[in-house]
Amino acid sequence: MSVEVEVDENDLAEMVEQVWESYLDPEGVSPLMQTYDENQPSEVHSSVSITGSWNGHVVYASSRAAAQRAAAAFLAMELDEVSEEDISDTLGELANIVGGNVKAMLPPGAQLSLPQVVLAPEASARFPNTERISGVYGLWEGEPVSISMWQSSTDTKEEGA
Amino acid sequence: MKILIADDSRVMRQIVVRTLRQAGFGDHTLIEAADGQEAYDMATKDQPDLVISDWNMPQMTGIEVLRQLRAAGNNVKFGFVTSECTPEMKSAAEAAGSAFFIVKPFTAERFDEVFAPILG
């Protein structure tokens, strides 16, 4: 029987806060303001898969402008200096950081994949047989950003059995 | 001192470099490796005084790099900067001879705390 995993919105929000404090908003002037809107739009996204003691995906999604701003902050560059590759690398690293922190909260025996980056909306991605179990949705300087967890239904079935 | 930064993410290598500077360690010589094999090769050839390594990398993972260096008699000071942090990873790192374990996201204060005793 698989263990029920409780990585809730508060846990995700705490990780988000650490990422903002460390890299995206070290001065503490532009935090992610939560909107709690699961359906806010995105233009780009990245994800990592977790397998083993828990099976699912951690997805980071945002507008292109927010991704560009994140890359500028990560690389200490001006917004107009940011390249497509900078945006991809930054999105991949954001999924990796949040995914790694999620993994640390899971029972032993979980594996983290390398990140995948798609410069297309999160809505274009399909994670078959999964359901969204938690997420943080917000605006960063007016631009949508979200971090969500999708659990494979094989796990949920076992939990219900 | 010469410091080798090993991470397959280019942005993360840059962040490590910048954070080292912010923590006051910018006057050391910094060299970079983009995967585990390169990290092993550079740790052997370039003889750094310190290796700051990611865990999850292509070719060889960070822990494999550390184990192979130790098996080859290389005792360079070596530690991890990783987004993955579980008790079993920490104990595997310690058992292999790791000097520190820094979890992403990290701050300049955390770097100072870890590296001040090592780099002076």
Image (cartoon, coloured by chain):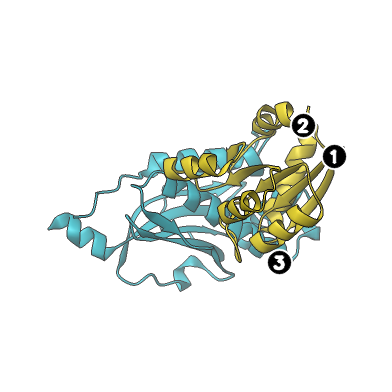
Chain colours: A cyan, B yellow
Report in which chain the residue with disc 2 lies: B
Report in which chain the residue with disc 3 lies: A
**Secondary structure under the numbered disc 1 in the rendered image:** loop
Q: Position of residue B69 (x, y in %)?
A: 65, 52
Q: Position of residue B73 (x, y in %)?
A: 67, 48
**Pointer 1 with pointer 2, Cβ within 8 A:** yes
Q: Neighbour class for label 2 at 10 Å: few (<14), some, many (≥20)?
A: few
Q: Amino acid at mark 1?
A: His
In the figure, residue A90 lies in which quadrant? bottom right
Q: Position of residue B34 (x, y in %)?
A: 70, 61
In the figure, residue A29 lies in which quadrant? top right
Up/down of A74 relative to A10, above or below: below
Side (left or right) of B20 relative to B100:
right
Residue plotted at (72% across, 31% down): B118
Q: Amino acid at mark 2?
A: Leu
Residue at which label 2 appears: B119
Residue at which label 1 appears: B28
Of B30 and B105, the residue lying toward us: B30
Report in which chain the residue with disc 1 lies: B
Residue plotted at (58% across, 39% down): B101
- State the mark number for residue A85: 3
Side (left or right) of A66 relative to B117:
left
Are dots 2 and 3 on a single chain? no
